[in-house]
Amino acid sequence: MIAGSRSSKMISCRTSQSARRGFGRQAVSLLHPMSYLAVSFGIFDGALISGLMGLAFSAAAGAILLHVLPPADAVPLMMACSIITQLFSLVMLRRGIRWHGCSRLIIGGVLGLLPALYLLQHIDAGLFRTGFGIFLVAYASCMLIRPAVDCAASSRSPLQDAVVGFGGGLVGGLTAMPGALPVIWCDLRGMPREQQRGLVQPFIMVMQVFALALMLCRHCITGETLLSLTMNLPALMTGAALGVVMFRRIDDVLFRRIVLSVLLLAGLMLAL
């Protein structure tokens, strides 16, 4: 009995030591200058785009992070960074947030996520992403040529908001782009950039918080992800602040062109 207890203690000590050494190797890889600079630049790029537009953090940051980190580490990191950027932007632009209107979008979006989770297990999600990417490319290309329309005079109905939110949640669950359909809907109505952002940005943040909660339930957030998030907070906050400053300085025409250009690039990433 004594020998058995001693051997079990030795095994547990060796296990804890090897775990600490494994975590130490992960920390060293994060501290490697080139890896750190690449991750920081990707996070800064995503935060800048998100601070400017209110969306597309993962589309911008993922182009770099997915080449540096494995998807299991990159996806939770991008999700957490995007939520922090959204919160920062919402605080900075809180006067323009339309909580009454976006609440109907959010309710529809949450309902749309439920069938999306089911469809992920029963359809070819890759084929759906390709088709939706082609749609985004076609729409953004046409809208970049076509001049912006004036803001629609007719008032929105709660049913319209809920349907658009449902579509955004459904598409977001299959493509990780919940804001695409609401942004297109706002563009078709000719909404000014403040009104568009006040509706779409809270919707995107809630969808991402919901997705992050699912990741936490599945234990997808690791200590390495939290360490990388902490180390890259300066790049994240700097990019978000600069993006918000740029948003306040541009006009509606330029904002629309930037949004459509990002939708075009995101569509190409999904389709290719």
Image: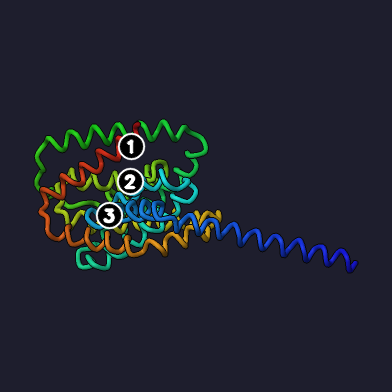
Q: Residues within 10 Å of mark 1 (few under 14, many from 20)?
A: some
Q: Residue at x 9, y 39 (%)?
A: 147
- Picture disc at residue 50: 3
Q: Is residue 35 visible?
A: yes
Residue 247 is drawn in which quadrant? Answer: bottom left
The reply, left or right, for residue 244 in relation to residue 178 is left
Q: Which residue is mark 1?
A: 269
Secondary structure type for disc 1? helix
Residue 255 position within the rendered picture, expressed as x and y whole percent measured from the top left: 15, 50
Secondary structure type for disc 3? helix
Q: Residue furthest front?
A: 33
Q: Residue furthest right?
A: 1
Q: Residue at x 27, y 68 (%)?
A: 91
Marks 3/2: CA–CA distance: 10 Å
Q: Are marks 2 and 1 in contact (CB under 8 Å)?
A: yes
- Picture disc at residue 59: 2
Residue 137 position within the rendered picture, expressed as x and y whole percent measured from the top left: 25, 34
Please state which of residues 38 and 219 is positioned toward the viewer in this rendering.
38
Residue 15 position within the rendered picture, expressed as x and y whole percent measured from the top left: 69, 60
Q: Residues within 10 Å of mark 2 (few under 14, many from 20)?
A: many
Q: Is residue 166 visible?
A: no
Residue 66 is drawn in which quadrant? Answer: top left
- Picture disc at residue 73: none
The reply, left or right, for residue 123 in relation to residue 18 is left
Marks 3/1: CA–CA distance: 17 Å
Residue type of the residue flagged with mark 3:
Ser
Q: Residue at x 15, y 44 (%)?
A: 257
Q: Are marks 3 and 1 in contact (CB under 8 Å)?
A: no
Depicted 62 relative to depicted 27: above or below: above
Say which label, 3 or 2, has the lower sequence index.
Answer: 3
The reply, left or right, for residue 165 in relation to residue 16 is left
Residue type of the residue flagged with mark 2:
Ala
